[in-house]
Amino acid sequence: MPRAEGLHRGASPLPLSCALAPRATSWHGGIVNIAEIVERLRARVANLSKATDTADVVPAQVYAPPSTEAVAAVERRLGVELPAPLRAVYQHVGDGGFGPAYGLLGLVDGAKNEDGLNAVGVYESFIEPDPDDPHWQWPTGLLPVVHLGCAMFFCVRCDTPDGDVVWFEPNAHVEGMPWDDTLFPLSMSILALLEQWLDGVDTLTMMEAAFDAKQEA
């Protein structure tokens, strides 16, 4: 069962230099260009004080991008192929340490939470069964990527080509019931989420929209 976690970071900057061919990915609100978002992220994280929403409290560090071989090894370990937009963000911006709230967790190594776990580590801890809760069953391929604090994550569905985002919010879960009440689809891809963050939309607004949509469904 999840518990509240923080994110551990250092404070050294990362030089960013890599070309990325343009590609478009769609979401319910329009079209998002991968190359454009990558360039905007690079510009944003070049100033570490703006690399995450919490950089004024927890100094941010953007980690070096993982190699193609390292990402392939992660995919084999997870048993899933990462959506191309998510892979592009990691390989052309960095291995976590930037983005909404406490930022993206690392994929290969990179940014970790207070338990020393990156995104893969959190996923592997979540897919383990809970002997005290027969209802606990983490969806295969749902990768916790953005650490929101208070045990919450924006997760990426690796079974969708654009990397659809689902908000995991376990704090209001009713004990003894299925965990479906903790998963809130955001109706957007990971690139669309990062674009909204770059445009100044706060995470609370995204959460509220997802909550309202699920209530109305």
Image (cartoon, rainbow, N blue to C red):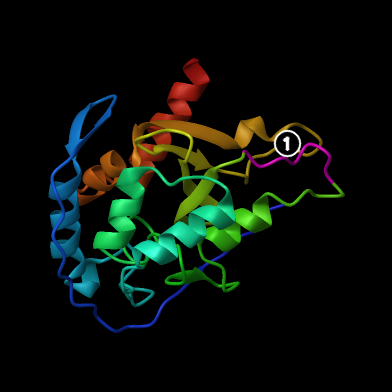
Name above or below for residue 159 compared with residue 86: above
Residue 159, percent from left and from top: 48, 35
Q: Give the range drawn in magenta.
A: 133-139
Q: Which residue is drawn at 44% across and 23% down?
A: 213
* Magenta segment main secondary structure: loop
Q: Residue at x 34, y 55 (%)?
A: 100
Question: In the orientation shown, which residue stands out farthest toward the top?
Answer: 217
Look at the image and say whether residue 134 sits in the magenta stretch. yes
Residue type, numbered disc 1: Val
Look at the image and say whether residue 166 sits in the magenta stretch. no
- Is residue 47 something that shows in the picture? yes
Please tell me whether mark 1 sits on a helix, a strand or a loop: loop
Residue 161, percent from left and from top: 37, 34
Nearer the observer, 54 or 1: 1
Question: In the orientation shown, which residue stands out farthest toward the front?
Answer: 69
Based on the displayed image, in which of its 4 quarters is residue 83 positioned?
top left
Count of marks overlaid on the render: 1
Residue 135, percent from left and from top: 78, 36
Based on the displayed image, in which of its 4 quarters is residue 17 positioned?
bottom left
Q: In this view, does 83 lie to the left or right of 194?
A: right
